[in-house]
Image (cartoon, grey):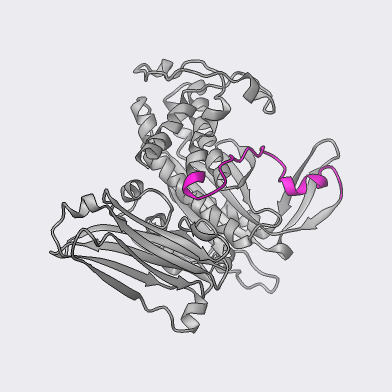
C-alpha cells in the first residue's frame, strides 16, 4: 500500500515532466509518445520545464490505475475520448432527441489567472494543462466521461446506459473528494518543489443530478459543425454550483442529495461573510422565479470533505493525512466483504458501488500478531455501526449499534461481525482499537451505499 501511495504522488510529477508538442492528433498521440527522463527542478523561472513529448500510455494512466485499484474497479484503464458522450454518438448532426438521466460535474482551477502575472505564457499553459490532465484522469478513473475543456475548466458526465444512477452519482462525489486529495497531497507540493507558488491554487467543483424526464440529449449546431450535449436545468445548475464553491470545495445540488438520500452529516452549510458576519447560503444563485412568481429556493449544500474522505477506500496511511477522523496503525487492517453462496467472500471497497438490499456484509478487523506482541494487554476492539437515511429513520434504526471484543493475548488477532443491507442510503461502520489506558491507537471507517 505504501508503494501505491508513493506512485500516486509521483504520477503528477510524470505529467508535469511532459510537455506537449505544438500540435498533435489525439487519436494517434500514444503511438508517437516517447519516454522522457525525470527532469530536475530549476530555480530559474524561465526554465521551469524542458521540452518533451507527450507521456506514454503507461505514464499517462499511472494515477488512474492506482485509484481504480483502490476502488475495486476492473484493472483496464478508462481510455474514453473527450467529446460526445458515447451513449449519444448517434445523435451527432441529426434532429433526433433523447431523454436520459445524467450526473454533471463542473471543475474549475481556482486562482489560476494570477499565474500569468508571474510566469511566461508557455509555463502557465504547461502548469494548467498538467493540472487538467490530472483532473481528467481522476474523472476517467471513476468511470466518468470528460465532455470538454473550457480554458482552465473541465466539464464531465457520470452515468451510462445500464449503470446504476446511484452508483454513478456517488462516483462523481468520490471523484470530487479524490480531486481535492490529489490537489492538496500531490499537485501543490509538487509545484512548490519546482519553485512554483501554488499555495493559492485549488479546484472548485459543482455537481448535480438530472433524472430521465429532466435531461434532453440532442445535437446543437449544423450537420458539419455540431456538438451533442445535454439540455437540463440540472446541468446548468452544476455550473452555477461550481461558481459558488470555495477553493478546494464542492457544492452539491438538492436533486443529487435527494437521489442518494445523502446524509446531512456528510454535508456542510455554506456561509459567506457579510458586514463582518457569517451568513448562511441555502439556495442556488441566482434564485430563479417560477412561473407563478415565487422563488425557486433550490437547496444546495457543501460537501463535507473531512467526513466524506474518511469513507474513501484509500490506505489508512493516506487517509489519516487528509482527515482527522482516521488514525492509521501499521499491522492493523479493517475491511468489508460481501458474502454469498455463489461467489463466497468478495471484497467491498468502501463506497465503491451501490449495493442492493438483502445482501450480507462482513466487517473484519485484522491485527498482526507482531503488533500485538508490542502492546500492553488487555485492549479492546470496538465496532460502531451507524445507519442514516429516511428509511432507517422511519424504522427507528438510526441509534448507533456498538459491538466490543476484548483483546487479551496475541491469539486475539481477528474480529468480525455480519449485517444485512436493509435500508436505502449511506451507512457507516467504524472500527477502533483502544489500549488498556483508553488511548485510541487505530480508527478507520467504511461506508456502505444501499439502493
**Span highlighted in magenta in the image:** 68-95
Q: List x then y, in percent, for residue 81.
A: 67, 37
Percent position of residue 391, x then y: 52, 78
Residue 100 placement (x, y as % from top left): 73, 58
In the foreground, 415 or 386: 415
Magenta span contains residue 336 = no
Classify the position of the C terminus by image quarter.
Answer: bottom right
The one nearer the camera, 284 or 430, is 430
264 left or right of 342 in image = left
Residue at position x 45%, y 17% from top?
Answer: 37
User: For the stretch drawn in magenta, what is the main secondary structure?
Assistant: loop
Name which residue lies at 63% across and 19% down: 32
Q: Is residue 413 left or right of residue 313?
A: left
Q: x, y percentage for residue 390?
A: 51, 77
Q: Is residue 439 above or below residue 192?
A: below
In the orientation shown, which residue stands out farthest toward the bottom? 395
Q: Is residue 110 visible?
A: yes
Query: Viewed as shown, does residue 420 lie left or right of 290?
Result: left
Is residue 87 on the magenta stretch? Answer: yes
Q: Compare residues 126 and 321 and report the one nearer the observer.
A: 321
Which residue occupies 56% across, 44% down? 139
Q: Quadrant of residue 356?
A: bottom right
Regarding residue 241, the answer to whether it shows in the image is no
The N terminus: image quadrant = top left
239 vs 396, left or right, is: right
Amino acid at each position: 500500500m505504501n508503494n501505491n501511495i508513493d506512485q500516486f504522488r509521483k504520477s503528477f510529477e510524470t505529467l508535469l515532466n511532459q510537455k506537449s508538442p505544438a500540435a498533435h492528433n489525439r487519436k494517434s498521440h500514444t503511438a508517437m509518445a516517447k519516454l522522457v527522463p525525470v527532469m530536475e527542478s530549476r530555480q530559474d523561472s524561465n526554465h521551469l520545464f524542458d521540452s518533451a513529448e507527450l507521456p506514454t500510455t503507461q505514464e499517462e494512466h499511472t494515477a488512474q490505475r492506482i485509484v481504480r485499484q483502490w476502488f475495486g474497479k476492473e484493472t483496464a484503464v478508462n481510455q474514453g475520448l473527450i467529446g460526445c458522450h458515447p451513449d449519444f454518438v448517434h445523435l451527432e448532426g441529426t434532429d433526433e432527441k433523447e431523454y436520459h438521466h445524467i450526473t454533471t460535474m463542473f471543475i474549475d482551477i481556482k486562482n489560476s489567472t494570477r499565474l500569468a502575472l508571474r510566469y511566461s505564457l508557455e509555463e502557465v499553459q504547461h502548469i494548467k494543462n498538467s493540472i487538467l490532465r490530472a483532473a481528467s484522469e481522476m474523472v476517467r478513473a471513476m468511470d466518468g466521461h470528460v465532455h470538454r475543456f473550457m480554458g482552465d475548466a473541465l466539464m464531465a458526465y457520470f452515468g451510462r446506459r445500464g449503470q446504476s444512477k446511484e452508483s454513478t452519482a456517488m462516483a462523481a462525489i468520490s471523484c470530487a473528494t479524490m480531486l481535492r486529495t490529489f490537489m492538496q497531497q500531490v499537485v501543490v507540493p509538487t509545484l512548490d518543489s519546482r519553485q512554483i507558488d501554488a499555495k493559492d491554487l485549488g479546484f472548485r467543483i459543482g455537481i448535480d443530478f438530472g433524472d430521465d424526464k429532466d435531461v434532453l440529449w440532442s445535437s446543437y449546431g449544423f450537420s458539419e459543425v455540431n456538438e451533442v450535449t445535454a439540455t437540463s436545468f440540472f446541468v446548468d445548475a452544476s455550473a452555477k454550483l461550481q461558481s459558488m464553491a470555495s477553493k478546494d470545495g464542492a457544492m452539491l445540488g438538492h436533486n443529487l442529495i435527494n437521489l442518494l438520500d445523502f446524509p446531512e452529516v456528510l454535508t456542510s452549510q455554506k456561509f459567506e461573510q457579510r458586514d463582518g458576519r457569517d451568513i448562511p447560503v441555502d439556495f442556488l444563485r441566482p434564485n430563479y422565479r417560477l412561473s407563478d412568481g415565487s422563488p425557486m429556493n433550490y437547496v444546495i449544500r457543501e460537501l463535507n470533505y473531512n467526513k466524506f474522505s474518511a469513507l474513501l477506500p484509500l490506505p489508512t496511511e493516506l487517509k489519516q493525512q487528509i482527515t482527522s477522523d482516521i488514525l492509521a496503525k501499521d499491522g492493523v487492517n479493517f475491511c468489508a466483504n460481501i458474502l454469498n453462496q455463489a461467489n463466497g467472500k468478495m471484497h467491498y471497497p468502501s463506497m465503491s458501488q451501490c449495493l442492493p438490499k438483502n445482501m450480507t456484509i462482513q466487517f473484519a478487523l485484522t491485527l498482526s500478531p507482531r503488533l500485538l506482541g508490542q502492546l500492553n494487554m488487555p485492549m479492546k476492539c470496538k465496532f460502531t455501526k451507524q445507519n442514516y437515511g429516511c428509511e432507517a429513520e422511519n424504522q427507528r434504526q438510526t441509534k448507533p449499534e456498538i459491538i466490543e471484543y476484548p483483546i487479551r493475548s496475541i491469539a486475539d488477532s481477528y474480529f468480525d461481525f455480519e449485517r444485512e443491507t436493509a435500508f436505502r442510503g449511506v451507512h457507516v461502520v467504524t472500527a477502533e482499537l483502544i489500549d488498556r489506558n483508553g488511548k485510541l491507537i487505530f480508527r478507520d471507517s467504511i461506508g456502505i451505499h444501499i439502493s
